Amino acid sequence: MIMIPAAGGTMQPAVGLIANPASGKDIRRLIAHGSVFDNNEKANIIRRVLQALDAFGVKQVLAMPDLYGLVLRALEDTQVGLRVEFVNISVTNTAADSRLAAAVMAQAGVRCIVTVGGDGTNRVVAQGCGDVPLVPISTGTNNVFPSLVESTLAGMAAAAVACDVEPVWDRAVRQARRLEIVRGNTLVETALVDVVVYDERFVATRAIWDADKMRALFLTAPYRGTIGASAIAAYLPQAEEVARDAAGLYVELGPGGTHVMAPIAPGLIVPVSVRVVHPLELEQTIPVTYAPSILALDGEREVPVPPGTSVGVRLSSHGPYVVDVQAALQAAVKAGFFIRKP
Amino acid sequence: MALSRETLLGLYEMMVKIRTFEERVAEIYYEGKQPVFNIAAGPVPGEMHLYSGQEAVAAGVCAHLRPDDPVTSTHRPHGHLIAKGVDLKRMMAEIFGKETGLCHGKGGHMHLFDPELHFGCGGIVGGGIPHAVGAALAIKKRGEDRVAVSFFGEGAANIGAFHESLNLAALWKLPAVFIVEDNLYAISVPKTASTAVRSNAERGAAYGIPAVQVDGQDVVAVYEAAGEAVERARRGEGPTLIEAVCYRFRGHFEGDPEHYLPEGTKEQWKQRDPIALLAKQLKDQGWLTDEDAQAIEERMTALIAEAEAFARESAYPPPEAALTDVFVQAESPREEQSHG
Amino acid sequence: MAERLLTTARAIAEAIAQEMERDERVFIMGEDIGAYGGIFGATQGLLEKFGPERVMDTPISEMGFIGAAVGAATEGMRPIAELMFVDFFGVAMDQIFNHMAKIHYMSGGNVNVPMVLMTAIGGGYSDAAQHSQCLYSLFAHTPGIKVVVPSTPYDAKGLMIQAIRDDDPVMYFFHKGIMGLGWMAPNPRATGPVPEEPYTIPFGQADVKREGSDLTILTLSLMVHRSLDAAEQLAEEGISAEVIDLRTLVPLDRATIIESVKKTHRVLIVDEDYKSFGMSGELIAIIAEEALDYLDAPPKRLAVPDVPIPYSRPLEQAVIPSVEGIVQAARELMAE
């Protein structure tokens, strides 16, 4: 594993890089009209990130290995001076890789982690990264958490964060909320955007697209203009009102409510019946007793709730730190970060 | 797409049936080949490519198919044909090369044809893909709601037939479903060394075909994705490409030394045995008990023993039968002749 | 009433049209067979009559669409696929050799592949090595393919209808020089009487195109025309040549061949395909097996001398059998 000198020494600014080779290929290409993010394009995105990091003083990148070698491919056609090393994990080609890689990177002392994926990817990375901020670049299907940002700019922002440019941390890094799934007192899973109680038993193809099977929705924030399950609240006037004073939202779904036309997947706009919108306070836990069911976290079926069992969903302030790319760039401009003497 | 208990137990039983069949064929295959391996010896001679480990793909896809939906398969065809609903006796007899076999002993394990099930396969990688296109073309011309399905490996996705077929199927908007069984290896060459894209699902975009990647070890995922694809085809909305990521538990063929496998990876994959995975999901839901599972296994074992007995007892075709079936009409039908 | 005259191309197109009218399972696909009417005219008028659903222009995708024809045939359709030049077979060889030809056998006779694969053959117009071959022997060598090679408009129509109605895969080879195309060298024999009503010519029946008593010329396709021209010259020299048009190589009409050899005692084989390991050698082997004692002279053969077809006119004319070459070979055979 790569050794980075401990903080306080003459540490070289290092950035983590986690690119999910599996994102952007699930069944939402079939049941909806999700865009395809092929891996050659992802390699291209990585090249742009590396160029930006290299141009602005980042000397080391610590990357997640994957079976396909996304980062290796990116490097093949890129001339950069920075050193790219891979974290030493055994590749399983599952989400566990991203979680473990994030943890190893955090331990190694990277200043931030650039993620290339969708909501699902960031959810898993957030479980491993501790308090290292994320710079998410969206290549998924539902991209609520990661911003649609040109990856060169994301790389420039990441460089500013990594190089400790003075006002950047204050102005552009914030801690996100998260939703925690608890069984008794045990935290079993987390989500960054939304949790849906889905009337189905199996993980299967992960995605959720049948609005009639959605029983309840939890949101970390009153989102606007989003896609996916969070859209159900995003286009609902009463949600806007409830959200005014709330940290998050808890929405009961089911027959007999207000029908909102919501884009629950790309190109899939369906009526969803919303019964009640509740505010959700920080640290408030709502029991889910609808069983059997399965919880979809950030758009993917993940946690089965077998018959006769229940779980709790809690809104928490302990989400990952996230870099606001535009704010980081502005702060870095003020600091003259992009100025070089001729 | 109802993931009902009945449906999932059906999938479970089908996977057990395929696994039991394959493991029994493996045992039979080594009869007469030990202590010295001679590929031509024993009751089942020749190459033998078994499907163990990939059951979720065949079971999950074929559960949506009717007997009259055409299926083209590969050199590893047993799982697909069993899932399509073949008479195990005639299939086993064909593998034994017997007169009572599906092809009267002329095809063997790699060339199984069952016209009642509209099933064909062959030993040429990628060879069956255009046939599914043609079958789908026939279906479309007749205005039927059948769907043609082609199973093939990720190795076949690099042959021209795959690309020509995808282009034709998309161009003509045919009711076809292409299933890439990505078992990571084309004989010994890993996909990473053969394929310029990580997932063949990415290749659908080049032809405007919706393409998805699914966990081929999770039969519920395969079932769900295939269900959407098959229904889409039946509705006349065109072809779909599904890449199911899976693993060969028995290597490319019987006798494969598998020295090309990185250490420990097979064991890792076996942790996700598709049958065990579904069993766990069913048990979690209270839909399957250990007793149920055992009963299913016993029933399948008995069924396959019956097929084996039938195959063993059946006669070999007479040698002179080798000279028949080259043509339907060896002589021309002179009664249709009006001139000449 | 005067006989109706058609070019071979028109005769083939008419045969296909009549079968498409008779049997809705018949459809045709290939490159430039629609609006263009086939590069060699074999599908003229079909698009207008039957529309693009049944007369399908395909992409340049021979493995794909010939394979699709196999798949459609196994599903009970009766597809006709056109391979523009036989020389292009290479890109689709797997589908032809391993699938079209073998599925019926591999299935133990349970699956039929009733399709026609028609294709243009032959040189003589400086199209060189990749657009001038005949290659029917190559396909006749493979079990499971019926091989049809007509020479006249009349035979072309009857054999095409027979091919479409046949339950086996049939390869139908038409020589570019017999089609009656305005842009090829004029060939009066490319136009001939063709009845309007549908008719079939059974496979495996050679046709004695000219009776004779001194020697037998076994041939097919354009070489029938050249052999007939040669026979006329030979007649002037007092040599009576019998010209047998084999019409189909698979099945092969052995009886007519043997009968003729027993009558004339001399045999000349004229073949536009490559010489070695092909049709000419096979025919001589059959004669040796069944009528050796009847021969008064060793058999003779004229064929492409195992070189690719060259481009330059004198080079090409040097390798493809000519009327003069046939006359000369016949004289030599008579002198033995």
Image: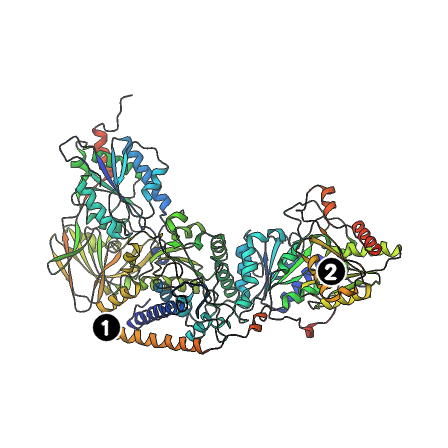
Residue furthest to the front: B35
Q: Residue furthest top?
A: A342
Image position of C80 (left or right of B235): right
Residue C201 numbered mark, or none: none
- Image coordinates of residue C264 in percent, x first then y, are 82, 63
The span from disc 1 to disc 2 (Cα, nearest Å) is: 74 Å
The 10 Å Cα crowd at callout 1, few under 14, some 14 to 19, many 20 or more, is few
- Examine the image and state in which quarter residue C288 appears: bottom right
Q: Residue at x 54, y 61 (%)?
A: C99
Label 1 marks a residue whose chain is: B
Q: Residue at x 57, y 52 (%)?
A: C90
The image position of residue B4, as x and y in percent, is: 29, 70
**Rendered-image quadrant of the C terminus of chain B:** bottom right
- Of A284 and A106, nearer the camera is A106
Task: Identify the residue under disc 2.
Answer: C153
Residue labelled with disc 1? B290
Nearer to us: label 1 or label 2? 1
Whether labels 1 and 2 belong to a single chain: the reply is no
- Answer left or right for C97 relative to A63: right
Please say which color scheme the image uses.
Answer: rainbow
- Chain letter of the residue beneath label 2 in the structure image: C
Q: Secondary structure at mark 2?
A: helix
Q: Position of residue B185 (x, y in %)?
A: 38, 54
Q: Quadrant of residue A12?
A: top left
Q: For residue A216, say whether it is visible.
A: yes
Q: Nearer the viewer, residue A290 or A44?
A: A44
Foreground pick, A298 / C307: C307
Residue A274 x %, y %: 23, 61
Tell me the residue at 36%/46% (across/down).
Answer: A39
Q: Are marks 1 and 2 in contact (CB under 8 Å)?
A: no
